[in-house]
Image (spheres, rainbow, N blue to C red):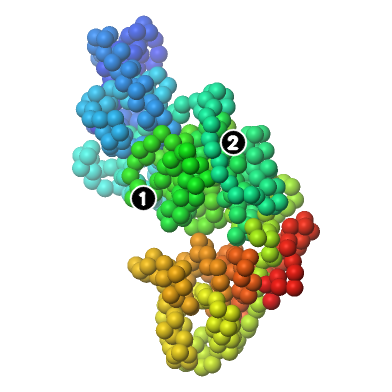
Amino acid sequence: METSVYTLTRDPTRRFSIAPDVDALYWDRRGEAVTVLETHPSVGQAFRHLRSGKGAPGDRLPPPPVSLWERWERAAHSLRSLLAGRALLWDEVKGLVRELAGPMGDQELRAVLQTMCLTGMAFMLPGVEIPSAVSRWRCNRCGSGPEGLFRSRCGRCGGECVSCDRCLFLGRSRACTPLFFFLPEEKGEASGDFRRVDLRLPALTEGQKWVSDRCLEAVRSGQRFFLVWAVTGSGKTEAVLPAVHRVLEGGGRVLWVSPRRDVVEELAPRLDRAFPDLPVNVLHGESGWVRTSSPLTAATAHQAWRFYRCFQLVVVDEVDAFPLKGDPQLRAGVERAAAERGTILWLTATPPRDLRRRLARGQFPGVILPVRHHGRPLPEPRLFRLWRLWSSLDQGRPLPPVTAFLERVVEHGGQGLLFVPRVADVDRLLSWIRRRHPDRFGECRGVSGRDGERKRILEELRRGDIRFLITTTVLERGVTLPRCHVLVFGADHPVFDAPALVQIAGRVGRTADYRFGEVWFLSAERTEGQLKAIREILWMNRVARRRGWLKEDEENGCQ
């Protein structure tokens, strides 16, 4: 895309434009003349020229007829409601405008976009910024550094170009392609744009109400970050919805970020039921563009890169889970999607160690919800050690804890999740069951993250067609079975760190009417991860008991 670098008569500052006629007319109305220094085949080359400060004197550009400005400005205001608060590449802008506003020629669209940049509705950068020092190369959409960028021959600009692999699935971000950041329209209480929103919510428990009040206060006070550390099965979604409701009624917008597409698809119907008057925008890799002006959006974490400072509240669910865990670019994208004075709620059952310490000491804003919605204590894991565990497995020797676990599940009419550390271990454990317990093998299935039939197998599991499922950590989250038991086989493997074991243990005891579920850790060695997970679960039960939130009796399920 041709891009010009120019200066003004009384201002030597270099500027760049994808439609210089627009700039000539804009500045002529302000008593300035535009002098074009150079025209480059791409925005990236123009941007580098802009930064270098080099260039010979150029030719003055005469302005086009004044009537064109009114046309461009009208179109700019018309597109603003469609584009405000987004961060989009040129091709994405074209596609969105074509799909939601009708066809518009490239030259006309460039003129309208340049008008938006000149009038403060937007600003423009190259998709990938490549200063002379390679160490400073950066994708302006996802924030990836040189490790995620590569140079190749580009059919678009005709030269050597740098593009980003990190966010490729959202469309190729290139040095030669403009990336537009559209400033948000004013939303929230400051705009006076109030609306009536119906919230349908079940009665909250005492613990949920306490968390709800803290979240509401964080939103009211404009707290930037607020952590909700809630045990699995606590009903944290319901506890946060009153804060979502407040922002929506105040005229604001809410983004609910989940780590994976399946979680987003499960969340959307819950939000629909809670806010029956508002359609929920659902965004993931295969969802297409948002087609409604609803202020409530549920999206995967990567989709946050397509927004810019437009949400008064961002709720980040499972902030400790892949892909958010350990990914500063994704977290930065989530923060960039939040309005400058917006609030970001982090929801997690397993916050990082430093964060939980700061929270416990009152050094970080947040709240702890240590009890499930039904008020029963968290099941406390039992440790089993077996020397030469893996060799015994491969040789088909007796594994008494595994046999006892299978019998326990059958005895109490439950279902068992057996977690193994590696994909190959799924078949190893299935082979052992077939050899040692052929009568149970027909009730067993295996699944991993590489299994294309995972969705169908999980449906069979939820229907009760499968009694025992051997799986990897891919199912440490998101699977809820009412009569669940868990065995972690090889719990001393590094993949089973304390947060993973807490999440896995959280699959058990999710319903009040089944109190027989147990959590067993089987390994050759006891590890710090196992001990930390047990200490955390015991600590949460103590905190809940101290606050008077537990409903304990002779059948508390912690056996």
User: 269 or 381, which is in the foreground?
Assistant: 269
Left or right of 307: which side holds 90? left
Q: Residue at x 45, y 89 (%)?
A: 439
What amino acid type is highlighted by mark number 2? Answer: Arg
Q: Vertically, is 406 above or below 547?
A: below
Q: Where is mark 1, residue-wise?
A: 285
Would residue 51 be visible to someone looking at this image?
A: no
Of the numbered discs 1 and 2, the one sitting upstream in the chain is 2
Q: Where is mark 2, residue-wise?
A: 246
User: 15 or 254, which is in the foreground?
Assistant: 254
Position of the C terminus, as image quadrant, is: bottom right
Q: Quadrant of residue 19?
A: top left
Q: Quadrant of residue 320?
A: bottom right
Residue 5 numbered tag: none
Q: Position of residue 284 (x, y in %)?
A: 39, 49
Position of the N terminus, as image quadrant, is: top left
Q: Residue at x 38, y 36 (%)?
A: 292
What amino acid type is highlighted by mark number 1? Answer: Gly
